[in-house]
Amino acid sequence: MAKSITLDIDGVRHDQWLSGNVDRDLKDFSGAFSFSFRDPPRSEAALPFATTGPLLKLKPGPSVTIRIGKRVVLKGFIEAVEPDIGDGQASVTISGRDVTGDMIDCAAMADAAEFADVKLEDAAKKIAEPYGITVRSEIDTGDVFSRYSVDLAETAFSAIEKGARARQALILSDGVGGIVITRTGKTKAPAALTQPGNVLRAKGTFTHAGRHSETIVRGQAEGAATKRGAAKLDSTAEPLETGARTDGDGSATTKERKGIVTTGRAKDDEITRHRPIVHLARSKADQKSAQDEADWKSRTARGASEEFTLTVRGHEVDGKLWTVNQLVDVSAAYLDVDRELLISRVSYIEDYAGIATDITVCSPEAFDAEPVGNRRRNRKSKKSAKGALDGKAQSL
């Protein structure tokens, strides 16, 4: 039987794998994959009566291209090879990530760098360029950064992510060599998820771990003197006599401190205990940036506190792939959920049991800046109309 998922290693098609997983996750940036094989060379060397098939030398390093149907969903590299042999079984598993995985592991710049007066997408392009990764923006990323610093020990992903967080934007790998700067819920899923219905299995997690009553972000902007300009020196000036000097009232120091120190605060009204947390802004942050980052962190933690994973048969609906960052209507009474949610993770699965997709969903406000409104509430159920009893009914 032809497989839904196809795997090319260094340009050569390999279809003798036993199971395959391809994952995309809004929180992991880089897409990932895993395939299990029977490895004929290893089997022949280890097992006296092993039958060999096409030779396949599995090792870290080769490039991979993965398709679902005719659609390329991931281009990356094999990063790990894990042979496993025991009583009655022998297999080897390969795994890796798409090409943006190197940006998670490696330095943004060999030397510390700083960009002046750049928008988020321009800074991202400069950071991604050495890795051969393209960047496109689907949104207006807002104001320019007067200073965009890249620390010496900072990874490429971290250097871009901190700017995206300050602008409440979402950065995604497209899986095939590009980065997309976007916001959530730009497209609709190919079908609703319902149980009973097309959902084979559903499970959920409700937790307050990681949530805080107040999220505080403290940052540091440019000094007030930098913006107003330093006074010019006068070569003819004479030093003041000691008696001519007057004590200040402290107002100048207060103004200077307000011009430098910024604080953003966001409350989570659903957390009634005293659970504050303080973060330091990782880039030069004015008051608006600090407030935006505090809101972003609070929303993300709240969104992650309710996650549901639903399993459906197949990878597509009418030729359209289930994918991340889509809005989907979810109705699953056992999970007590009946509202529009955001697909935050998909895992395409193919093995001896068949073809399926695990779809993880969360509340949409976890990754955007739109008003929460009713997005965390279930739809009101439609109660069936009941006629008045007439007292004449008899038992059957």
Image: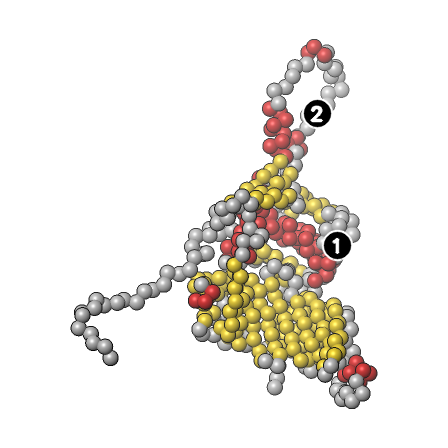
Label 2: element kind: loop
Give the percent coordinates (x, y) of residue 95. Answer: 70, 70
Q: Amino acid at mark 2?
A: Lys
Label 1: element kind: loop
Please, which residue is most extreme toward the front here? 395
Give the percent coordinates (x, y) of residue 120. Answer: 62, 50
Q: Is residue 41 left or right of residue 229?
A: right
Scheme by which the image is coloured = secondary structure
Give the percent coordinates (x, y) of residue 271. Answer: 50, 48
Q: Is residue 50 above or below residue 34?
A: below
Q: Is residue 192 above or below residue 373?
A: below
Please name the residue shown 66% across and 34% down the image: 223
Give residue 91's mark: none
Q: Amino acid at mark 1?
A: Ala
How many numbered badges does the structure rendering display? 2
Please name the residue shown 63% across and 75% down the image: 67
Which one is nearer the viewer's eye here, 369 or 130?
Answer: 369
Which one is nearer the viewer's eye here, 7 or 182?
Answer: 7
Using the numbered discs, state the Cα–Cα distance from disc 1 to disc 2 in whole angstroms.
41 Å
Q: Give the number of the mark in front: 1 or 2.
A: 1
Say whether residue 297 is visible.
yes
Quarter of the figure with residue 254: top right
Residue bearing mark 1: 107
Residue bearing mark 2: 232
Please name the residue shown 59% across and 69% down the image: 347
Which one is nearer the viewer's eye here, 189 or 270?
Answer: 270
Mark 2 Cα within 10 Å, few/some/many (few <14, many 20+)? few
Please name the residue shown 63% across and 49% down the image: 163
Q: Earlier in the sequence, mark 1 or mark 2?
A: 1
Q: Is residue 163 left or right of residue 206?
A: right
The answer to the question of whether label 1 and label 2 lie on touching residues, with beta carbons closer than 8 A, is no
Give the percent coordinates (x, y) of residue 362. Answer: 52, 60
